[in-house]
Structures are given as C-alpha cells and as structure tokens.
Image: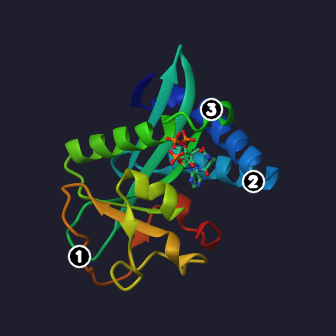
Amino acid sequence: MDFRLATQNDGEAIVSLFTSVFAQSEEDAEGALIGQLARNLLEQTEAADLYSFVAVEHGQILGAIVFSRLRLDAPISAFILSPVAVRSDRQGQGIGQALINHGLGELKHQGERLVLTYGDPAFYGKVGFQPVSPEQIMPPYALSQPEGWLGQVLTGEAIASLSGRCTCVAALSDPQYW
Ligand SMILES: CC(C)(COP(=O)(O)OP(=O)(O)OC[C@H]1O[C@@H](n2cnc3c(N)ncnc32)[C@H](O)[C@@H]1OP(=O)(O)O)[C@@H](O)C(=O)NCCC(=O)NCCS
C-alpha cells in the first residue's frame, strides 16, 4: 500500500470512489452529494488551499482524503479534513486510519498547524481529533450535529479559543454539508 498526493489524473477515480462508497454506506443520494463535493473541491479550489491524498495498491485507488483551507481571524494555518473514504470492500483493515495519519503527517511537514473535521468522534478520536466547541472555534455554518466538530493541533498543543467565525472554501460553502 502506498500513500501519495493525488494528481489531476486521479480526479475521476476519486470522484467515483466517493460516489460509490457513500452510496453504499448511506444511500444513492448521499453518494451523489459527496461525489459532487469531491469534484467541486478538486476542480474549484486553489492549489494552495487544497491537499488531497490517495491510498494505492497495485495501481488501484483504495482510499482518498481531501483537506481544504479554513480561514480564521487569527494568523493560523488551518485545514478541514472532509471527505475521506475507503473502498467498501476494503474497509475495516486500517487503511482509513493510515491514510488520515499520512495526510496529517504531510500537512505537519508543510508547516500547517490546525486541522478540523466534522464527523464521528469515536472514529476520528482514533487519529488524534478531540471535540471542539463552537465557542472555541466557530464553524462556518450552524452544525446539525455539534458533537461532530473536532480538531487537533499538529504540533500537539491544546486547541486555543479563537475569535470569529471561520470560513471554508467555496466547495464546502453550503449549509447542507454542515
Ligand atoms: C470511515 C472510513 C474512512 C474508515 O476507513 P477504514 O479503513 O474502514 O477504517 P480503519 O480500518 O482504519 O479503522 C476501523 C475502525 O474505525 C471504526 N470505524 C470505521 N468507520 C466508522 C464510522 N463510520 N463510524 C465510526 N467508527 C468507524 C471501526 O469500528 C474500526 O474500529 P476498531 O479499530 O476499534 O475496530 C471508511 O470506513 C469509509 O469510507 N466509510 C464510509 C464513508 C465515511 O463514513 N467516511 C467518513 C465521513 S467523511
């Protein structure tokens, strides 16, 4: 298994991975929604505001993850992890955690500091995320599941309280994702 930065040539495979994984784990409409989100993130986001990595085995993409920039009032480089998926027939084998850890390590290496995500605390807690309150860091939109607002500082410090609402890239600027 290799982990590497996604290239433009990976775009269609990544979109189809997200579409099929979320269709299987939830329903077709969710697959279409997250597939379109992945397409918009990859196609509409400035390169400086995006990191995308894939897990590859024998030339096949088994997993994909996207991080996009969050802007805060404070001078801190922050990204949001969303979405991530592992091919349905390969879930539960450690690929997802390894891919997330690879991505976090690369962001740290690039000097990025804070990573947030919005998802299941039980899963993301396995890869270092801790609950963040909206008072600590105000999300771009009101959250339908506030307990899913999670973060970590890549240098290991505690998450400070930061004033002001953070803003996300255009692809995520839609309340239905929140
Ligand atoms: C979530 C996902 C990326 C995890 O990747 P994975 O390769 O299956 O996960 P790993 O094998 O590294 O880790 C498995 C662990 O995470 C837990 N886990 C996996 N998916 C989970 C989920 N959706 N919610 C809670 N826990 C989850 C498993 O119970 C397992 O725990 P254990 O090690 O204590 O048994 C993958 O299952 C997936 O693509 N799911 C569908 C899409 C999705 O929900 N994406 C995340 C939201 S953006």
Mark 3 CB within 8 Å of ligand 1: no
Residue under pointer 3: 12
User: In the image, is residue 116 above or below residue 131?
Assistant: above
What distance separates the C-alpha of mark 3 from that of mark 1? 38 Å
What residue is drawn where x is 60% and y is 69%?
174
Q: In this rendering, would 94 be left or right of 49?
A: right
Task: Find residue 26 and name its label.
Answer: 2
Mark 2 CB within 8 Å of ligand 1: yes
What distance separates the C-alpha of mark 1 from that of mark 2? 34 Å
Residue 49 in percent (x, y) is at 37, 52
Residue 94 in percent (x, y) is at 49, 36
What distance separates the C-alpha of mark 2 from that of mark 3? 21 Å
What secondary structure is marked by label 2?
Answer: loop
What residue is drawn where x is 51% and y is 69%?
148
Residue 170 visible in this rendered orientation of the protein: no
Three-letter code, disc 2: Glu
Report the quarter where the C terminus lies.
bottom right
Residue under pointer 1: 160
Residue 155 in percent (x, y) is at 18, 55
